[in-house]
Image (cartoon, helix red, strand yellow):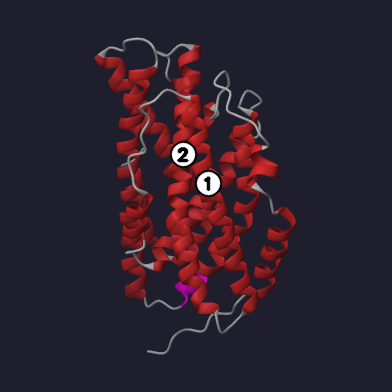
Amino acid sequence: MQTAVHHIDGDRFARCIATSKRVRWDIDDDVIRGRVFDTEQKYLPDGLSQVDQMGYLSTAEKRYMSQIQGRTYANLFGLVERFINAKVLELSRDHWFGDQTALEALVRFSDEELKHQELFRRIERMTAAAMPHGYRLVADPDEVAGVVLGKSTWSVLALTLHIELFTQLHYRESIDPDDDLSALFKDVFLFHWKEENQHAIVDELEWRRIDATLRAEERDKAVDDFIELVGAVDGILQAQAGEDARYFVETCGRQLGAEERRALEAAVLKAYRWQYIISGAQHPHFVKVLSSLITEAQGGRIMSALATLQ
């Protein structure tokens, strides 16, 4: 069967390159600037941490929970960017001897993702210095990347666009408007957001390019892969929610009863599912792009899988 021909939108790739050059930033000079984390401030806004729904916690405890969730939020971005960067480098091969504008856009994307990973490693070291001992990130980034990259490229790009879009949504609607957050934490995600904007455009362009090469049965299998990837993400979130609830209980300074512990773990998992799955799956642009590539029946399968997580 002859491979479908897909037009490379060089103008959109060129605009991504121009944006990349314009917003380029440095971890030390622009983001950290010699600052440290202040534990008297929230790290993650209530709209993401959902601590306003944890009525059994005091004001100080809610602030502490926002710090734990903020630490995990940064760590999980570092985790997903491990597989995103590997996939971007793999995709760049398709443009080695073709459109050099597309190649440059992907190379810049990869360079920025490597920088983001270093930023989040720095943030973990800094939050570790400010917070009690005992915190643990459950998932190993390399192991997760190995599992994700074992799935179809179509499904990995679907997951990647989903992530890039909710990153922007979270910053614009929750992080930026909250004046009670740590200024350093806000800046981490301000500068991250600046480069994620063009990444989402590249994700969509490459997803559509890959989609144009698939037969109907290959796309149907890719939809199943995407559902499996979302399930794998949820497995990570379940494990991390339990771990973060344990860390809070052991370090918050008071004894929580069994019922409070169960409620806390359920609330943290609910917040994490909103942050990393639901907010992206409901993003209007993600829904628009996904719907343009799949059948109504395939969309129904995806919606049914997501419904079990709410």
Indicate whether 15 appears above or below 56. Answer: below
- Residue 33 visible? The answer is yes
The answer to which quarter of the image holds residue 251 is top left
Mark 1: amino acid? Phe
Mark 2: amino acid? Gln
Q: Which residues are magenta?
A: 208-212
User: Looking at the image, which residue is at 55% across and 78% down?
Assistant: 95
Q: Quadrant of the N terminus?
A: bottom left
Contact (Cβ within 8 Å) of mark 2 with mark 1: yes
Q: Nearer the viewer, residue 55 or 125?
A: 125
Q: Name the dominant secondary structure of the magenta segment.
A: helix
Q: Is residue 240 left or right of residue 41?
A: left
Kindly state the secondary structure of the residue where label 2 is placed. Answer: helix
User: Looking at the image, which residue is at 58% across and 23% down?
Assistant: 38
Residue wearing tag 2: 275
Residue wearing tag 1: 166
